[in-house]
Image: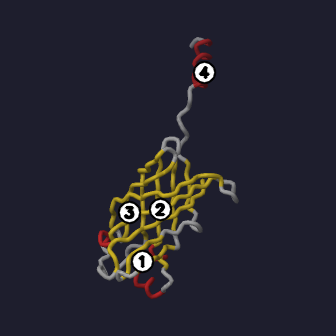
Amino acid sequence: MNKHLFAALATLAATIALPSQAADSYTLDPAHTFPSYEVRHLGFSIQRGRFNKTSGKITLDRAAKTGTVDINIDAASVSTGMPLLEEHLRGENFFDVAKNPVIAFRSKDLKFNGDALVAVSGDLMIRGVIKPVTLNVTSFRCAPHPMTKKEACGADANVTIKRSDFGMNFGLGAVGDEVKLLINIEAMKD
């Protein structure tokens, strides 16, 4: 090959814009990620609980507005402040943690409005039953963490589901069928 042609091609290749980098990977911070729920009780009040053990990964390409979400919630870590209720929730009538220890959410469908993440559609698994859901994202921010100086991302998301769709039919009428899931996430860049 002609030396001048080779030099011209090398110069041209160096000036062509490269495609955006691959998505960044983040690991959920279990000390700041506590999914919770709200459900109506006897028509009188909204009862709340949370899960104390969550793990997962997120990939995010903010330039391409794409990514993935992979969240695993330890169903046995349900916490209500009432030990007897927690044991009941872990049993066959509700989460059945002996057979279904993990509540999971998986997504490859992130929706942005400009630079803001506004929704994440994917599959929610509870008690081994998988249903499509769309989490509404009400808050989203990525920035250097003030203490570690590593990039971190955080979000608040929610969705309302019917527990009966996941085989939790015990006490319907006394305890509401509609359950609001609230998922707060903080994740550190790998």
Q: Circle 4 sits in a helix, a strand or a loop, which is it?
A: helix
- Closer to the eye: label 3 or 4: 3
Q: Circle 3 sits in a helix, a strand or a loop, which is it?
A: strand
For label 1, the crowd category at 10 Å Cα-Cα, with few meaning under 14, some 14 to 19 and many 20 or more, is some
Left or right, 137 with reference to 128:
right
Q: Let me know if residue 59 appears in the view.
A: yes
For label 3, the crowd category at 10 Å Cα-Cα, with few meaning under 14, some 14 to 19 and many 20 or more, is many
Read off the residue under disc 1. Answer: 46
Q: State the image coordinates of residue 64 (x, y, percent, origin top left).
A: 49, 41
Q: CA distance from mark 1 to mark 3?
A: 23 Å
Read off the residue under disc 3. Answer: 124
Callouts 1 and 2 close, C-beta under 8 Å = no
Please report whichever mark, 3 or 2, sits nearer to the chain's N-terminal start: 2
Q: State the image coordinates of residue 110 (x, y, percent, origin top left).
A: 44, 50
Q: Residue at x 58, y 63 (%)?
A: 29
Looking at the picture, does residue 164 appear above or below residue 157? below
Left or right, 163 with reference to 29:
left
Q: State the image coordinates of residue 9 (x, y, percent, origin top left).
A: 57, 18
